[in-house]
């Protein structure tokens, strides 16, 4: 028998199948194997087997060994991988890597085991009477095991002595066995079951999802009980012997979702995301692969969970841009989910209070089934929105980050013993550091962006590459010591809130405060237990969280995202405002939202304060149709990045010439075509240029040609790749 192997080397030159003799290795389809490759040994994946090879048999090499006890990749995994390989035009090795934890591939982590000791079946009194006088430690070990049962040998060795344990083992008085230790994430999570009776809208949503032969979009306002619908769907699927995947957009949401699923389904759940330790990720992955767990919960990478007999995929907050991968392979999670669901015959369910424009159009066009949930489960109205015009605030002498209305509402909230959330999508202390004399702006040496001041560490930081710099004592251009801070970040908001409300306890949640593995969980746990009065944070606090005591949300710089040079800026602003506002008033007390803006009459903000998604959608879809933006076209962007500007420009010219040939042959399908600098010309010390095109319809032939051009110009000196409808145009 011949094994057909993809070697784990992600280069286009080696993106092909290599034949090896299975020999005595016993390799099965889906197995990870070690194979000889040139002068070296490397890991590979068996993607199929055959009786014979077209390569001369005497020249075929044999598989050295199989890595895992059972094949790491399921047949569903391999079928999905093949589709992604064809869809995203990347090497098969790159795609197969998506299905395994990184540390597992590199051999840096494996199953953890420990030796445990327990009493043998020999009568305990007979054992004690047979011991010699003076064997006090051996007697102590036996007594300990009698009282405590099976115990780790390491504990016995440390408490008593290794020689005593060894002697008892050799005499047959204790039995030592090697057992697997499962590294469990979020051990501190409290599981409490809150089974509720579904209301009519929830019941209808469950019915639509289960009965539809199409993907289903659940459009439900914040607090409408979408999570309980998801739980019922999972319950229905696993009771029929199938498995399920539930995706959430942010790592910060995973512990909360995990706790609800764990309360309902116990150890049948496993969690997968990048914030776990290598050991935890490895063990959770194997629990899913072995069938010990049948429900995978996690961020976008959990779509590749090694589950067999898949019956359901849920994508919560389906509008969130974190579902789009920004590194190769550049996949979109709902596209992958659609393919996987179709291949496995699983139900695909997507939920959001503010669906993507493209998704809602598909629902209205009948491509998706639509289930709407228009009311909150507690029967309360959505929070009242109060707009604060910050231009008027400044005119009246208020230069603080907080409007008069927000200060007053904060005071009222704290006086009543309730909690508040303050949202600002900008971390750090200030946005820019500027010299008052010559207008010099401190910028990152590696990126074409200004640095942010972080007061807690007294450092300047780049929010793109992570570089850190000492704070300026004087301007490096003119020598002036007149250094000014502009803009406001979460650090500054916390400081000013503390000045306003000295007795209030304030927590901050942003990328700076969530560096450790369980920091998301700990911050949210403390706030949920009312150990703090105010939570200040960026977009990671904007969605999914349910805090009954939160009755006020303050949104600072609500219009900030409106002015990004991106056709989705209005959509993202509407979604963000609606999602953040939804954190307020989720229990008995009425919720309020204070939205601070310099553009109170903006149409996007006006529809957002009324929670009028339909009106927003009608306006937005009309603009997209008139201007030929997605979903009425596809944006193709070939990015060229290099640390050498001259090399980047030279490659851009070659890419453009090749792309222009495609353009000239298909002009009737193009709406726009040109080359230019990227809006952010340099990031992480790489110069960035782009060829930008918009094409009509879903033209796979043109996309294929553009993928080919990008791959042909990829080299060690230049990163060249294609993005289709990228989540960010910067």
Image (cartoon, helix red, strand yellow):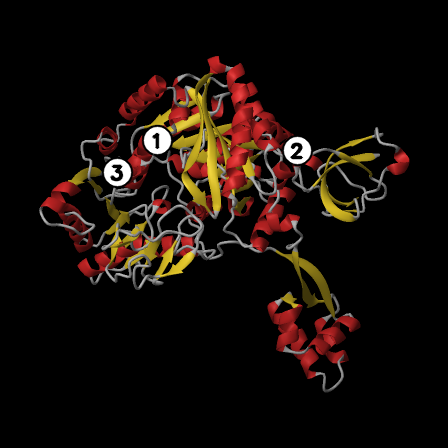
Badge 2 marks a residue whose secondary structure is: helix
218, above or below 647, in the image: above
Badge 1 marks a residue whose secondary structure is: strand
Q: How many marks?
A: 3
Residue 166 falls in image quadrant: bottom right
- Picture quarter with the C terminus: top left
Q: Badge 2: how crowded within 10 Å, few (<14), some, or many (20+)?
A: many
* Residue 291 seen in the figure: no
Q: Position of residue 23 (x, y in %)?
A: 85, 41
Read off the residue under disc 1: 220
Q: Badge 1: how crowded within 10 Å, few (<14), some, or many (20+)?
A: many
Q: Residue furthest bottom?
A: 134
Read off the residue under disc 2: 78
Q: Badge 3: how crowded within 10 Å, few (<14), some, or many (20+)?
A: many
Does the residue at mark 1 contact the one at mark 3 (Cβ under 8 Å)?
Answer: no
Q: Which residue is found at the position 68% from the left and 66% from the top?
A: 118
Q: Which residue is found at the position 67% from the left and 33% from the top?
A: 75
Question: Residue 559 shows which numbered tag?
Answer: 3
């Amino acid at each position: 028998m011949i094994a057909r192997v993809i070697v784990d080397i992600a280069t286009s030159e080696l993106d092909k199948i290599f034949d090896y003799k299975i020999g005595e290795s016993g390799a099965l389809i889906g197995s990870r194997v070690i194979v000889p490759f040139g002068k070296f040994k490397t890991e590979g994946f068996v993607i199929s087997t055959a009786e014979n090879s077209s390569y001369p048999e005497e020249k075929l090499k044999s598989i050295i060994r199989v890595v895992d006890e059972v094949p790491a990749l399921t047949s569903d995994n391999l079928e999905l991988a093949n589709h992604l390989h064809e869809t995203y035009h990347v090497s098969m090795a790159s795609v197969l890597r998506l299905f395994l934890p990184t540390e597992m591939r590199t051999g840096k982590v494996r199953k953890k085991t420990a030796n445990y000791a327990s009493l043998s079946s020999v009568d305990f009194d007979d054992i004690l009477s047979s011991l010699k006088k003076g064997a006090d430690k051996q007697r102590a070990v036996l007594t300990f095991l009698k009282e405590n049962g099976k115990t780790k040998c390491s504990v016995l060795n440390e408490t008593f002595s290794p020689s005593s344990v060894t002697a008892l083992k050799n005499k047959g008085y204790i039995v030592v066995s090697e057992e697997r230790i499962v590294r469990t994430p979020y051990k501190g999570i409290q599981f409490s079951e809150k089974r509720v009776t579904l209301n009519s809208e929830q019941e209808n949503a469950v019915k639509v999802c289960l009965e539809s032969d199409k993907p289903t979009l659940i459009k439900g306002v914040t607090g409408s009980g979408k999570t309980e619908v998801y739980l019922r769907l999972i319950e229905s699927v696993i009771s029929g012997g199938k498995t399920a995947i539930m995706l959430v957009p942010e790592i910060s949401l995973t512990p909360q979702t995990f706790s609800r699923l764990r309360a309902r389904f116990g150890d049948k759940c496993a969690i997968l995301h990048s914030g776990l330790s290598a050991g935890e990720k490895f063990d959770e992955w194997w629990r899913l692969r072995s069938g010990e767990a049948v429900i995978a919960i996690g961020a976008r990478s959990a779509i590749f969970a090694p589950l067999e007999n898949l019956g359901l995929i849920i994508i919560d907050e389906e509008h969130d841009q974190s579902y789009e991968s920004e590194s190769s392979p550049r996949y979109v999670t709902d596209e992958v989910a659609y393919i996987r669901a179709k291949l496995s015959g699983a139900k695909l369910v997507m939920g959001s209070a503010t669906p993507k424009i493209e998704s809602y159009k598909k629902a209205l066009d009948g491509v998706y089934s639509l289930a709407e949930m228009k009311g909150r489960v507690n029967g309360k109205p959505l929070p009242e929105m109060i707009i604060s015009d910050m231009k008027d605030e400044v005119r009246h002498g208020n230069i603080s980050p907080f409007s008069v209305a927000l200060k007053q509402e904060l005071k009222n909230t704290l006086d009543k013993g309730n909690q508040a959330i303050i949202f600002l999508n900008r971390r750090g202390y200030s946005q820019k550091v500027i010299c008052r004399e010559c207008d010099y702006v401190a910028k990152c040496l590696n990126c074409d962006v200004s640095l942010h001041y972080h007061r807690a560490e007294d450092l300047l930081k780049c929010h793109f590459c992570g570089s850190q710099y000492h704070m300026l004592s004087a301007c490096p251009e003119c020598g002036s010591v007149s250094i000014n801070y502009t803009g406001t970040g979460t650090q500054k908001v916390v400081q000013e809130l503390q000045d306003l409300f000295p007795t209030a306890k304030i927590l901050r949640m942003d990328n700076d405060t969530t560096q450790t593995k369980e920091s998301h969980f700990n911050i949210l746990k403390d706030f949920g237990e009312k150990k703090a009065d105010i939570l200040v944070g960026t977009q990671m606090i904007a969605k999914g969280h349910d805090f009954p005591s939160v009755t006020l949300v303050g949104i600072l710089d609500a219009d900030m995202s409106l002015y990004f040079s991106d056709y989705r800026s209005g959509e993202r602003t509407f979604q963000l405002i609606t999602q953040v506002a939804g954190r307020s008033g989720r229990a008995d007390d009425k919720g309020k939202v204070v939205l601070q803006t310099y553009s109170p009459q903006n149409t996007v903000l006006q529809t957002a304060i009324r929670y009028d998604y339909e009106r927003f959608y009608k306006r937005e879809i009309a603009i997209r149709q008139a201007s030929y933006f997605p979903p009425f076209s596809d944006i193709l962007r070939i990015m060229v990045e290099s640390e050498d500007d001259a090399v980047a420009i030279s490659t851009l010219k070659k890419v453009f010439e090749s792309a222009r040939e495609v353009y000239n042959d298909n002009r009737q399908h193009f709406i726009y075509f040109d080359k230019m600098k990227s809006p952010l010309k340099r990031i992480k010390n790489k110069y960035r240029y782009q060829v930008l095109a918009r094409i009509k319809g879903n033209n796979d032939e043109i996309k294929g040609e553009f993928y080919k051009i990008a791959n042909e110009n990829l080299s060690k000196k230049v990163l060249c790749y294609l993005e289709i409808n990228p989540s960010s145009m910067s």
